[in-house]
Image (cartoon, rainbow, N blue to C red):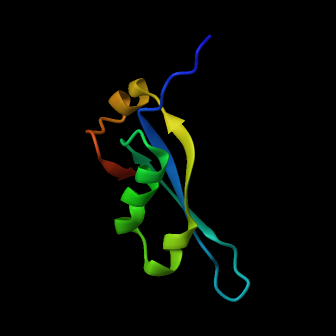
Amino acid sequence: MTKATPAGWVVQIMTPGHAGAAPTFRYFNVAIADAKMAAEATVVHVTAKSAANISPVRPLSAQEIAVLRLKAGAVKPA
């Protein structure tokens, strides 16, 4: 069985908590197949402070992209 090539990514943005508070996590569905480019595309959705805390979490299949109604290159909150 071969592994399918990702059609997009779920990207996580972690914002550190203030004064010992727990961090905040936000997730985005990104219709960009390259993990690094998908993470970079989410930068417009964050503050400069949390820009360093962006990481791809898991791939999205072409079927998931279709169900989510994402157009190529789209970034939407999960």
- Viewer-proximal residue among 77 and 57: 57
In this rendering, position of residue 22 left or right of residue 74: right
Please, is residue 5 above or below residue 70 in the view?
Answer: above
x and y percentages locating residue 8 in the rendered image: 42, 38
Question: Seen from this angle, which residue lies furthest right?
Answer: 20
Numbered circles on residues, count: 0
Considering the image in quadrants, where does the N terminus appear? top right
Q: Is residue 27 left or right of residue 1?
A: left
Which of these two is toward me, 29 or 34? 34
Judged from this view, the residue extending furthest toward the top is 1
| Residue in the image at 52% along x and 37% along y | 59
Query: In the rendering, at what x and y percent does residue 67 appear?
Result: 36, 29
The image shows residue 26 at horizontal and vertical percentages of 52, 60
Q: Residue 24, image x and y in percent?
A: 59, 69
Identity of the residue furthest to the bottom in this view: 19
Residue under the point 34% across and 67% down: 44
Which residue shows up at 40% across the image and 66% down it?
43
The answer to whether residue 73 is above or below residue 69 is below
